[in-house]
Amino acid sequence: MSGGAYTWACMTDILKAYLGIRTKLQQEKSSLESRLRDINKVLQAAAVPAAAVAPVRRGRPATAPAIKRRKRRMSPEARAKMAVAAKARWAKAKAAGKKRL
């Protein structure tokens, strides 16, 4: 037996295997296409007309729950510190001859 005959036999086996797989894939494809057609028929029969579907509302819900926040209160000490800091800023600006900060 020569090397060429062995290679030819292997090529034939590979080709037969390829053709078998190709045939199975084609059968599977036609089966899937048939099922898809059936599904599309069912979906088209059950489709609701566009006029019957309510439009989708975007954005914040109309009845958004109001979040009641507590009023932030500053302690008298904190207000006093802020007043002292503001007076210091103004004194520094006046010393520099500025009329605006």
Image (cartoon, helix red, strand yellow):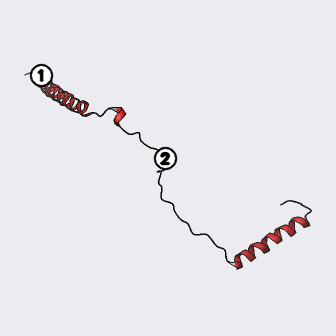
Between circles 2 and 1, the one closer to the viewer is: 2
Provide the secondary structure element on which disc 2 rests.
loop
Mark with earlier residue (2, 1): 1
Q: Residue at x 36, y 33 (%)?
A: 51
Give the side of residue 68 with respect to residue 10, left or right: right
Where disc 1 sits, the SS reads helix
Mark count: 2
Q: Can you tell which quarter of the image residue 43 is in? A: top left
**Drawn side of residue 62 relative to residue 98, left or right:** left
On the image, the x and y values in percent for residue 100 come to 86, 59
From the top left corner, tell me how far across and down residue 62 is, in percent.
48, 51
In the image, is residue 77 above or below residue 89?
below
Q: How far apart are marks 2 and 1 (CA)?
A: 66 Å
Q: Quarter of the image for the C terminus: give it.
A: bottom right
Question: Where residue 8 sits: x, y (%)?
Answer: 13, 21
Q: Residue at image x 47%, y 54%?
A: 63
Left or right: 80, with 62 as reference point:
right
Indicate whether 37 appears above or below 99.
Answer: above
Instruction: Give the residue drawn at x 21%, y 29%.
Output: 41
Residue that label 1 marks: 12
Look at label 1 and name its amino acid.
Thr
Q: Dot 2, how many residues are within 10 Å of its Cα: few (below 14), some (14-19), or many (20+)?
A: few
Depth check: 32 or 76 in front?
76
Q: What is the three-letter code of the residue carrying label 2?
A: Gly
The N terminus lies in quadrant: top left
Residue under label 2, please give it: 59
Q: In which quarter of the image is residue 50?
A: top left
